[in-house]
Image (cartoon, helix red, strand yellow):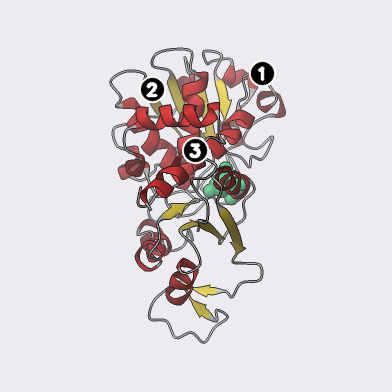
Amino acid sequence: MENFTNVGDIGDLRAALAEAAEVKRNRYAWDTLGRNRTMVMLFFNSSLRTRLSTQKAAQNLGMNVMVLDVAQGAWKLETERGVIMDGDRPEHLLEAVPVIGSYCDIIGVRSFASLTDKTADYGEVVLNQFIQHSGRPVVSLESATRHPLQSFADLITIEEFRRSARPKVVLTWAPHPRALPQAVPNSFAEWMRAAAALPEGGVDFVITHPRGYELAPEFVGDARVEYDQRRAFEGAEFIYAKNWSAWADPNYGKILSSDRDWMVDEAKMALTDNAFFMHCLPVRRNMIVTDGVIESPTSIVIPQAANREISAQVVLQRMLRAL
Ligand code: AN0
Ligand code: CP
């Protein structure tokens, strides 16, 4: 595997799920594969799960791992080419990236959407600079438009918990006090559409959100969009909650409604087919979801997060084998 930035990079989903199950049976079976190999993880934004699970996965494979928080201790990085660097950013990404590449074999990078420059965000300007200038395979740890390690872990989790051959999976918008990127829902949609296309063992995928929160067509594709949240929940086997800000112009990156009525609560979960509750975390309780739902026996947010180690390990071992 060259880079891991989107669903296309994982190839056959069935093969990837089989490899994930194999890793889960014994995650230390390949503990010398990464011997004398180094991973650098670069974070432009905060993280709990991605940082720990990816480091753990790399260590399961015997790799050395270095983590750099750009906001803490590193030089602030300019990302745009052609600017006169007379501001507060002493170093350019165009030097920093190849320098980092010279110290490692694999680079992981987390760089969220600005939510102000849609062209740069959806052009994946920062991620692409790493791909073009590092000379190393790049793993997205959540880029401006996608969070593929999360979506892969989500798919593994759905595969483990599914009760039916073609479960109804509902991605629902939920309220949040601050504007968040579209990366997680975009990516989840991209992976669920790939799962929906499987000849067997696929999913029936539905997206529900208030009007104005339409995601980019390249991610929604032919997925069903239902504006009535309660109707969307009917018969669902998985409820996947996430907030996101508006994508459509002229409201890109804005909060249009903090409609508390969209919170996932017990009454809405009662409309489902005893659905499992999923969220990528971090989650704001009693904004996105009630205490009762997230603490209920059908909440699978903890095993979902635990699968981040598994998805990261599958990706890293494929990259190591291709080095
Ligand atoms: C981020 C987001 O919504 O993209 C990261 C989620 C994994 N969430 C927050 O910033 C709260
Ligand atoms: N789900 C997820 O990526 O969590 P972190 O932001 O804590 O890494």
- How far across and down, in percent of the image, does residue 123 sit? 35, 59
Residue picked out by circle 3: 311
Q: Is residue 117 left or right of residue 199?
A: right
User: CA separation, marks 3 and 1?
Assistant: 24 Å
- How far across and down, in percent of the image, does residue 187 sit? 42, 42
Tell me which numbered mark, 2 or 3, is placed earlier along the sequence: 2
Q: In the rendered structure, which amino acid carries the disc numbered 2?
A: Val
Ligand 2 has an atom within 8 Å of the beta carbon of the residue at disc 1: no
The answer to the question of whether label 3 and label 1 lie on touching residues, with beta carbons closer than 8 A, is: no
Residue in view at x 50 percent, y 35 percent: 153
Residue in view at x 49 percent, y 61 percent: 114
Tell me which numbered mark, 1 or 2, is placed earlier along the sequence: 2
Q: Secondary structure at mark 1?
A: loop
Residue picked out by circle 1: 297
Residue picked out by circle 2: 203
Q: Secondary structure at mark 3?
A: helix
Q: In the rendered structure, which amino acid carries the disc numbered 1?
A: Pro
Q: Nearer the viewer, residue 193 or 54?
A: 54
Q: Is residue 258 left or right of residue 314?
A: right
Q: Nearer the viewer, mark 2 or mark 3?
A: 3
User: CA separation, marks 2 and 3?
Assistant: 19 Å
- How far across and down, in percent of the image, does residue 186 sit? 41, 43
Circle 3 residues within 10 Å: few <14, some 14–19, many ≥20 = many
Q: In the rendered structure, which amino acid carries the disc numbered 3?
A: Ser
Residue in view at x 37 percent, y 56 percent: 122
Q: Secondary structure at mark 2?
A: loop
- How far across and down, in percent of the image, does residue 102 sit? 46, 69
Residue 224 in sight from this viewpoint: no
Q: Nearer the viewer, mark 3 or mark 1?
A: 3
268 shown above or below 4: above
Residue 205 in sight from this viewpoint: yes
224 shown above or below 272: below
